Image: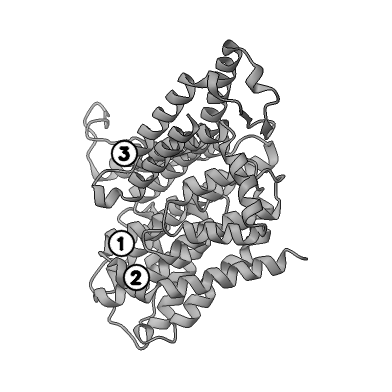
Amino acid sequence: MENIIIIIFILGYLAITLEHNLKLDKLIPALGMMAILWAIVAFGIDNFTNWFDSGAHALVDGFSNFTSAEKHHILEETLLHHLGKTAEILFFLLGAMTIVEIIDYFDGFATFKNYIKTKNKKKLLWIFATLAFILSAIIDNLTATIVLITILQKIINDKETRIWFAGLIIIAANAGGAWSPIGDVTTTMLWIGKKVTSGKLIEYLIIPSLLCVIVPVLIASFMKPFKGNLDIIEGEDVGTKSKYGPTMLYLGLSAIIFVPIFKTVTHLPPYVGMMLSLAIVGIFAEIYSRSQFSLSHAIDTEGDDSHGYHSPVHKSLSRIEMPSVLFFFGILMAVAALESLGMLFIGAEHLKVLIPNTDVVIMLLGVGSAVVDNVPLVAASMGMFQEPIDDHIWHFIAYSAGTGGSMLIIGSAAGVVAMGMEKINFFWYFKNIAWLAAIGFVVGAISFMFLRQF
């Protein structure tokens, strides 16, 4: 029975990895795999001898001696437990995505374009790398990449030049997301899963993440594509479409930054703070939107200005990437099925025997995240390792999974979206950018292993 479960998981994982070749959205195999795995677990519950208690982080003693009714009761409790933990991550992401979409509704991100005054390619590279590193730590690396490449397209006409900048933005965005609890889905998973705290994550990873982006950008700044000046596209309005754009940008970013503070003060799950932040941003969005609507449309004699008015919150919710949310749900619950049967725990014990050096294992995890999605890799590692909160192993996993994906353009969400926006060729990236990302990854990893001694 265990072998069948492993085969189904591998097949589902391959379908996810080959989504572009199969022309099948990865949410479909993720959801299908999740449902089939739990169905097999339910049908074969009487035949399983091991069960992993996620709450106690240990195998259940004497599980094979339990009655069928007791095993089914434990199955239901375990499924509910994993659903609750997964829902915490999903609602957190939904809140963050909605705030980002509200900022975009008011064209707030166009404000960043006002910071770019230089025509020097080298200076422009450092500006975009810095913005990517900081912005990805606040609104996540995927959104930061979309925002910055959109701005890039408005100021650089030559595509050949632009894709070089895009390649370095991917590295910077992934590095920026690795040291923040809200900067990447994987770090958010570790944070909400009580594997790391926001303060220690920043403390341990800020320097390795900085080195991971500074070294590649420094090397690239001496390369031919970033020498000389470029022609900035003229004749475009550098302001935002809405006068409330800058206000909503700073309000939205502040609201997201507020979430870790809220968690620290109240000790409530992060999604509670995110919902509060969304409510506050939503209030201002409605007020500003109605004010904007009133100025641009005449109010009828009865004072009814509802006709033609569109709520910015409703509009933003309609633009959320639900396929991504459902994919996260499917893959996290699928990995939970393997964890519940104790497969990840037992697999970790075998791995420790095969490769005694944990650092090597985690670095291989980082390399692996360049090939396959880092979400299931981190989800699996959370079930494999049982170290306490803020153990160095969790921070190293956050770093490796977050930055390792930069080594291939398909290895991270930031890379995939940049590939789509700029039509970047896989082999072009592998030839020109991958080695820079690899150098940054190794330098950051070495610095982490050195600094943790102090």
- Specify whether 71 is left or right of 174: right
In the rendered structure, find residue 37 and report the number of the disc placed on it.
none
Q: Could you tell me how far apart the alpha carbons at marks 1 and 2 are, in whole angstroms? A: 9 Å
Q: Amino acid at mark 3?
A: Lys
**Which residue corresponds to the image point at 65% horizontal and 66% vertical from the top-left?**
448
Q: Residues within 10 Å of mark 1 (few under 14, many from 20)?
A: many
Q: Is residue 381 above or below residue 150?
A: above
The percent position of residue 171, horizontal first and vertical second, equals 45, 67
**Which residue corresponds to the image point at 70% horizontal and 69% vertical from the top-left?**
450
Q: Could you tell me how far apart the alpha carbons at marks 3 and 1 are, in whole angstroms? A: 27 Å
| Viewer-side residue, 246 vs 15 | 15
The percent position of residue 376, horizontal first and vertical second, equals 48, 45
Q: Quadrant of residue 268?
A: top right
Q: Secondary structure at mark 2?
A: helix
The percent position of residue 89, horizontal first and vertical second, equals 51, 38
**Sequence-first tag of 1 and 2:** 1
Q: Amino acid at mark 2?
A: Tyr
For label 3, the residue is 315
Q: Quadrant of residue 289?
A: top left
**Sequence-first tag of 2 and 3:** 3
**Which residue corresponds to the image point at 62% horizontal and 40% vertical from the top-left?**
345
- Specify whether 32 is left or right of 55: left
The percent position of residue 1, horizontal first and vertical second, equals 47, 29
Q: Is residue 281 in view from this perspective?
A: no
Q: Quadrant of the C terminus?
A: bottom right
In the rendered structure, find residue 429 and report the number of the disc placed on it.
2
Q: Could you tell me how far apart the alpha carbons at marks 2 and 3 are, in whole angstroms? A: 35 Å
For label 1, the residue is 419
Q: Residues within 10 Å of mark 2 (few under 14, many from 20)?
A: many
Q: Amino acid at mark 1?
A: Met
